[in-house]
Amino acid sequence: MLKKMGQFVREEEGQGMAEYGLVLAGVAVVAVGVFFTLGDKIVEIVENITESFDGPAGS
């Protein structure tokens, strides 16, 4: 019984998955922050790109 408990305490598979989850959550928080901060600029850039496709060559 003590041997099994010792193996359970030393097992690190679940710990690795939790660390990956925390890193993924951190990346998601940063991405959302960037989108809120730069959202208007990103929309402006995309609109400029689409307008360049509709320019003189597309008329």
Image (spheres, helix red, strand yellow):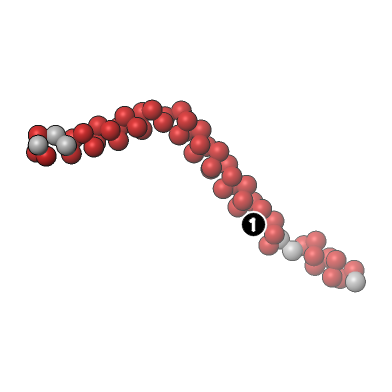
Return the x and y of residue 46 as percentages of the image width and height.
30, 35
**Residue 39's image quarter?**
top left
Residue at screen point 28% across, 33% down = 47
Residue at screen point 80% across, 65% down = 8
- Quarter holding the N terminus is bottom right
Q: Is residue 8 above or below residue 42?
A: below
Return the x and y of residue 16 as percentages of the image width and height.
65, 57
Residue named by callout 1: 17
Observer-nearest residue: 18 or 2? 18
Helix, strand or loop at label 1? It is: helix
Observer-nearest residue: 49 or 24? 49
- Quarter holding the C terminus is top left
| In this rendering, position of residue 21 left or right of residue 10 | left
Observer-nearest residue: 36 or 54? 54
Other-residue count near label 1 (Cα within 10 Å), few / some / many at <14 / 14–19 / ≥20: few
Number of residue marks: 1
Q: Amino acid at mark 1?
A: Met
| In this rendering, position of residue 15 left or right of residue 28 | right
Return the x and y of residue 36 as percentages of the image width and height.
47, 30
| In this rendering, position of residue 23 left or right of residue 10 | left
Extreme residue in the right direction = 1
Residue at screen point 51% across, 36% down = 32
